[in-house]
Amino acid sequence: MQAKDALNYDYSVAKCFTYAAILFGIVGMLIGVVIAYQMAFPELNYLAGEYGTYSRLRPLHTSGVIFGFLLSGIFATWYYVGQRVLKVSMAESPFLMIVGKLHFWLYMILMTIAVVNLFMGIGTSKEYAELEWPLDILVVVVWVLWGFSIFGLVGIRREKTLYISMWYYIATFLGVAMLYLFNNMEVPTYFVAGMGKWYHSVSMYAGSNDAMVQWWYGHNAVAFVFTVPIIAMIYYFLPKESGQPVFSYKLSLLSFWGLMFVYLWAGGHHLIYSTVPDWVQTMGSIFSIVLILPSWGSAINMLLTMKGQWGQLKENPLVKFMVFASTFYMLSTLEGPIQSIKSVNALAHFTDWIPGHVHDGTLGWVGFMTMAALYHMAPRMYKRELYSKKLMESQFWIQTTGIVMYFSSMWIAGITQGMMWRATDQFGNLAYSFIDTVTVLIPYYALRATGGLLYLIGFFMFTYNMYKTMTASKAIESEPQNASPMAA
Amino acid sequence: MEMETIRELQAYGYIFATIFLSVIMYGYLYHLYKAEKKGTRNYEQYANIALNDNIDDAPIESRTPSNKEKE
């Protein structure tokens, strides 16, 4: 059949989301570096009036990197991987092409309004759920469009079995849909009580209930945005780039169900020693510890996939990025459970150890895996080899140094902080006031911000490398089967 | 209900949930290995879906045509 011979995968939507991931990566990480320096040098808060204060910028950093950089990365990889593992092209369905493009443009409109809103200080004050109700409705529309795209493509697939990455993408879709709907149940105050502007709202839940729903959502945002779709990526991109099949497909299935069941119950660990019922705290703690098993199941499966092939680490920087990502996944999924043990949490809670933990996961695991995935996709999408291997190697080491500076400074700062808060004299009086701890921590804040700056520099190198790959790199005649071609 | 009774019920619930979930997990593992041994499934071959993913590669398992197509 001639028509089928000419059929190719259509990457137009994947390309759009790749540009978005790069754009939001720069914005989100730049703001992150600014607020990190603000912690070390507070006078930086006053550079741009109310718009440059820490309180305005912090939600922009978190939303920018989570819902901007990362979601775009997830969507970009989905529109690439989805077609390939289902062996069906989007070009075969005009409907799915329209859905994909609408998905992208509505997402961009949503993100633009969200950025303006957050700069203006309009938000619900719920962490990672700051958007007001009109934007929440738009989020639902964007998400449903993604759902159409996923299940539409599944509906016309040639490959009967859904590859393990597909399971994870579908879980991301369903998990976030459920979490987002429940946590963003809001009462529009203007329409109900004539209070505030038309877009203002308060949570439908009150007090401790609100806290429980919020952290059930908050921690599962980590689960279904920082973990599940990144596992989807690594299960496709590491085997494909290295040419090695997944070490144990059965282990990937077992880990999947383990992760799905356990993760949803772990959120209570954010509320240990708070006003929520004791059993919720204990359950959060126990499930967090059990979570080591499915997390390490996936991570070890990835490392064992490289069995006998470790030489590739020397030759291929993309494999290095991915193996490093998997290793950092193991580190942060061991660190998190340790922090959720009640006695450890008594020391760690509210300290800088927590953002330290978050960032060795996000910078090491999420960031590295997403960039490696986009690097892998570039030669296949643009039919050109990657622009510079040397630049990629330098980026790897600069960013790795940045990550190590970030988490080591935050470990020291967090434990110092926790110890100082708990220290008492012989009569049981607190030995230090709050400002004493702040003074001690300033050098670590400077170190952390510089670590973040190194990571940002690495991200600019990634951007440059991608840009040159798209525009000026040597064209390739046929699609590479495994290792991505790259110029020295 | 007295606090002591609630605690006791929680403890029973905890034990039963642990046993139940362990049985489910090992049951699933047993199911995976048994399906392979009986030859009804070869899970490990699905790993090749990622490796042989060109649009003209033969699917590892093609979708069975629907009844309508069969007619």
Image (cartoon, helix red, strand yellow):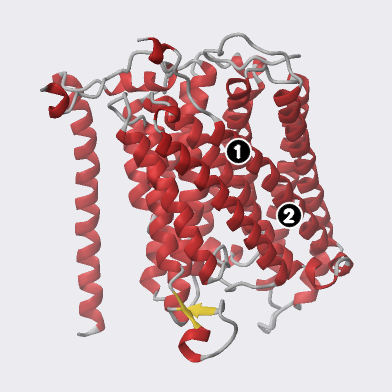
Disc 2 residue type (three-letter): Gly
Disc 1 residue type (three-letter): Cys
Q: Are marks 1 and 2 in contact (CB under 8 Å)?
A: no
Say the numbered circle drawn on residue A16. Answer: 1
Frontmost residue, A168 versus B5? A168
Q: Is residue A432 above or below residue A372?
A: below
Q: Quadrant of residue A54?
A: bottom right
At mark 1, the secondary structure is helix
Q: Is residue A176 left or right of residue A110?
A: left
Whether marks 1 and 2 lie on the same chain: yes
Q: Is residue A247 above or below residue A149?
A: above
Q: Which residue position is annotated with label 2?
A: A32
Q: Is residue A485 above or below residue A72?
A: above
Dot placed on the residue nearer the N-terminal end, 1 or 2 = 1
Query: Residue A317: percent from the left, percent from the top?
Result: 66, 22
Q: Is residue A411 left or right of residue A74?
A: right
Q: Residue visible at 77% across and 57% down?
A: A36
Q: Residue visible at 34% across and 31% down?
A: A251
Q: Mark 1 — on which chain does it sit?
A: A
Query: Residue A110: percent from the left, percent from the top?
Result: 58, 57
**Screen quadrant of the N terminus of chain A:** top left
At mark 2, the secondary structure is helix
Give the alpha-carbon distance from disc 1 to disc 2, as whole Å: 24 Å
Frontmost residue, A93 versus A340? A93
The answer to whether any part of residue A66 appears in the image is no
For the residue carrying disc 1, how many other residues have a C-alpha within 10 Å: few (<14), some (14-19), or many (20+)? some
Q: Residue visible at 42% across and 11% down?
A: A5
Q: Mark 2 — on which chain does it sit?
A: A
Question: Given the current orientation, which residue lies at the most extreme left position?
Answer: B71
| Tag nearer the camera, 1 or 2 | 1
